Every structure is written in C-alpha cells, then in structure tokens.
Image (spheres, rainbow, N blue to C red):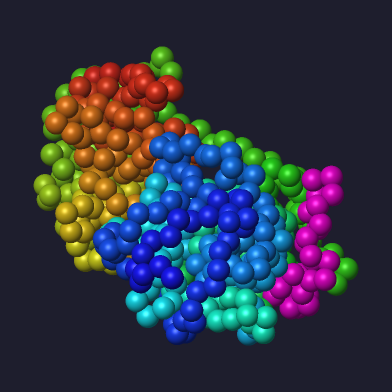
Amino acid sequence: MMPPNSAKRLPDANFASRLGANFASRRALLKASLLAGAGLGLGACATLPTSGPVRVADHGVRQADLVLQYAQGPVKGASPTQIVEGFLLACAAGYSDEFATARSFLLGQAASSWRPDAQVWIYDSAGNARVTDASDGSINVSAPALATLDAKGIYSVAFGGANHELTLSLATDGSGQWRIAALPDGVLLSATSFQNAFAAQNLYFFNRSRTALVADRRWVLRRRLTAHVVSALLTGPAPWLNQTLSSAIPDGVTLGSGGVEVSQAVATVDLSSEVANASANDKQAIVRQLATTLGQLGSVNQVIVDCGGTVIGSSATIRQGHRSPGAVVAASAAGLVRLEGNNTKVLLDAGALGEGINGVAVADANTIYLQRNNALERLSVSTKTLTQVNGDTDLGPVCADNSGWVWLYQGANVLVYSPQGTRYTLAVPSNLPIAAFDVASDGNRLAYAVAVGESMRVSVCAVVRDDKGVPTGLGEAYSIYQTDVAALSWVDEVTVAVLATANTAGVGQLTYAPVGGMVTDMTQVTNAVRLVSGKHGGQVSVLTTQGQLMVSSGATWVPSYSGLRAATYSRV
C-alpha cells in the first residue's frame, strides 16, 4: 500500500492492462467542496487525458481528448486507486453511454442513487487533476477549479485559486472486488471534455412588459441538442434574472411524449397538457419564445407547438439578421459629428460644442447626452440646445440602451435618466465603488467591475422594474471574470468585452467574457482609453489616447477615424 497523501499517476486509455493488487479496507467518507488556495500538499502527478483550453485563445485541443467516447469498465483485481482512476475516465465518456460504464465502478446503493446530472465540476486543464490516498484511508480527487455547472445548465466561475476536491469511499463487493461505495452527485470533467459534451446556447425569456425577449445563456448536452434546449427553457430563467425575466410557458410544463422532432428545418415541439388552457395571447408568446430560442440553432427555421397532437400555434419562417451598430457619433475638432463611411455630418459646430467633451451617448435621433469633464449635459439636435443635467465631475462614462434610457455611475450607485429626463438612483449589489460599467442594449442587464482584494471582478446583474417600466433596483450579482479592468462594454446580448489595465508600455489585453462561459483572449491593443461597441454582435472598437477609433483586423488594429475626443455608435 502507498503511504497516505501520496500522489498517484492518473490513467491513460490503456491503463487497465497494468492494474495491480487490492488495497486494505477503507473507512467510508464523503464530501465535495471547493477549497480556497492552490497549495494542497499533494505530490506530483500527471493529468487525466482530458486536457484542453481554459482560455480559447491560449491552449490547443488535443486530438486524444476529442475522440474519447468510451471507457473500459473495472478490471478484476483493480486496486481502490485504480478503480477511482477508471471511474473518472468513464465519467468523461459517460455522455456517450448514459454513464453505464461509470456506474459499473460503483457498489450497490451508490450505483442506483448516484446522479451524474446534478452538477459538473469543471477543472482548469492547464493544471493537474490528482488522485491521492487520504490519511483516514479514503481516496481524494483534487483539481484546479475553473467553474461549476448546475443541473439547470448555469455556469459559475470559480475565483481565488480554488480547487475542486472530492473524497470517495470504497468497499469490496461479494466477489472481493473494490468498488466505490459513497460519492457526491455530479461528475468531474476537464475543460475540453466539458466542451466536447456540452454546448452554450441562448434561452430567451420575456421582460416584464413582454415587449422583448432577453437572452439567458446556458450549457446543454450536445447529444439530442434540440430537445435539451427546450427542456432547459422549460426550467425558467436563471436565478439572477428571476426578478426581471419570465417565461410565457406555465410552470410545470414538460415535454410531451412526442418530444421534439425536426424535419426539413421545421421543429415540432410537443408540450404537456398544461399549455392547453393557456390564453390565445399566451400561446402566441409560447410560440415566439420557442421560435427565438430554437432559431439560433441553424437547423431550425420554423417551429410548430402542439399539445397531445393538437397544434396550438406555429411560427413564421425564422430569419436571422445582423443589426448594424449605425453611424459613429463623436466629438472632434469640427464639433459633434456623425460619421458614416466617408460621410461626415456636423450635428453641433465646434464653437457651440465647446471644450472638455469626454463622453457621448445617443438616446434617440434627437437626444444626445454629452459629458464635459465628466459632468452630464443633454443636447437637443433639432434646436441645437445644450442643457446641463448633472454638474458633478465624478461621474463615470455615459452609455444608453435601445429604449432611450441613459446610464452612468457615481461611486457605488448607478444613475439612470428616463427618456423624459427623470433621474433614478440604484445601488450595485456589492455596494462597492464602480470602476467600469455598461448597460446591455435591451436595458435589462448591467455589466460592471468593482475591486475585490488586489484585483477587480466583472459581474452582471438584472435591472428590476415596476409595472410601468421604471427601474426600482438591481438584482443579485453574477460574476463572470476577474482582472484589473480599464474599461468594459457589451459586445452582443451575452458577451462582455473587458479591456485590462495597460502595462508600462501602454499595451492592454482585450478579452471577451461570456455571461456564463469560458473567456476568450482577443488581440492586445496599445494606448486604449475607451471601448466602443454597437452591442449587437459586431466587433468592438477602441478609442486611443491619440484620438483614433481603432477596429481589429486579424491580429492587428487599424484606425477607422482619427481626431476624436469621445465616440459612440448611434444605434446602441
């Protein structure tokens, strides 16, 4: 027997031929927890053959990881450590065989009661997953934590150098073979194995007034993807969005016996009997919600919803379109200008505009908000009249949503101005001073950064509104990324671009951080001071200290306009 706390080399695909003799009996122990810090006092070990990218731009994907579909069951005479190692391999392949092989490593009650779908512990493939003997005779599995996925497909990032640590107990069966007798519900997967099994998809739920559908990003199994997407939609919005979004689909509705069938790009969704009593308006909303959600898959361009064989509604042909961010509106030497291609239109000349403009946001075709040395002003384009709105000089950069509401921050508060100019004040969940901030185009979600320890944490939260659409508060924080933040901006409905603080050479890293997903490092940029994005799936631009508006072209940045002091897109 190896001494307690000694590290074991994790298995490769052919480890079964090298299995050895039994270990002595072990005392049962069961726990599953996140442990802060990386120093666990474990010895050297090798990774499971399931490594892969944590940051999409940083790590390649090993071909061996991609082809891992099946695993070998327990081999006669396997030791407790080897049984655990084999079980981990079988979990990585479990989405191909419904975890039948993984259950063969479990004993009696554990085999029947274990729920692999309860959660997924995703570990950072840049580190090592380790199997060791515990001092009390149990087996520990430890891996550097990347995230956790819950049963609803909600992805929660792990921060602070945490580790996933699971402890399993083993016992012998009637034939004297070691099996796992107690273990936590869920599976441990590397980032690559996770991405091989799961896909990120947007579910769509209505805002409070049912005037718009808002994306809620989830991870669902790739196998039988369409059915899993619908099943996830039936569970309702993520908890952090519960106060803002709702589903037209009644509580308790499940997939009917017909499930989801796709034929010639038409998806027929059979729902349980609860939808039969829905109102005509609710049935239309259910169809719209399903069509918007399934339309993103590419394989579906129409949705039919039925209940027990009776059609309750069908969608028109689903058309995916790209929304233009519109023209650039900017402060320049010529004044406030609208830039579109080679065309320049002066909205307010330089003399009337004056000096000190360092922020701009377009509320509507006739209303533009400006910041002069951070203080807020409102411009009526038709009358060319400037009115001071807020004279404070400690305001953060101004931004706007699609409905004409204007947003900015002051300390730990978010200031919101309605299209009529009424001001509302909302406190961020952390009650910490905001370092960077942006509103999603739909106006239902905010992204912001606050200092946490020696770094900054980027979080999103929902905007809570009353029956009249007036913001009354902000929902709970859902953290998505951590770095030193210089600026951030929504890129599309589920992705936040984060510009890290520049190094001494003025170079900053641009990163795309999905709301519930793995981050992607984009190209670096020099002397950037502000992110400028149309928020509708187009690429993000950056404004530099030299007044250039830069757009990325491959691995480089090229200027689109020069001589700007502040800039935004006209359609946000």
Quadrant of image for the N terminus? bottom left
Q: In the picture, residue 257 is in which quadrant? A: bottom right
Whole-percent x and y of residue 181? 56, 81
Whole-percent x and y of residue 180? 56, 76
Q: In the picture, residue 58 is in which quadrant? A: top left
Q: Nearer the viewer, residue 352 or 554?
A: 554
Whole-percent x and y of residue 463? 39, 63
Residue drawn at the location 19% of the way across and 29% of the way down: 506
Whether 541 is drawn above or below 149: the answer is above
Q: Nearer the viewer, residue 486 or 132?
A: 132
Residue drawn at the location 60% of the way across and 51% of the way down: 13
Q: In the picture, residue 479 is in which quadrant? A: bottom left
Q: Is residue 265 left or right of residue 296?
A: right
Q: Is residue 308 left or right of residue 426?
A: right
| Range covered by the magenta-colored residues | 253-279
Q: Residue furthest right?
A: 309
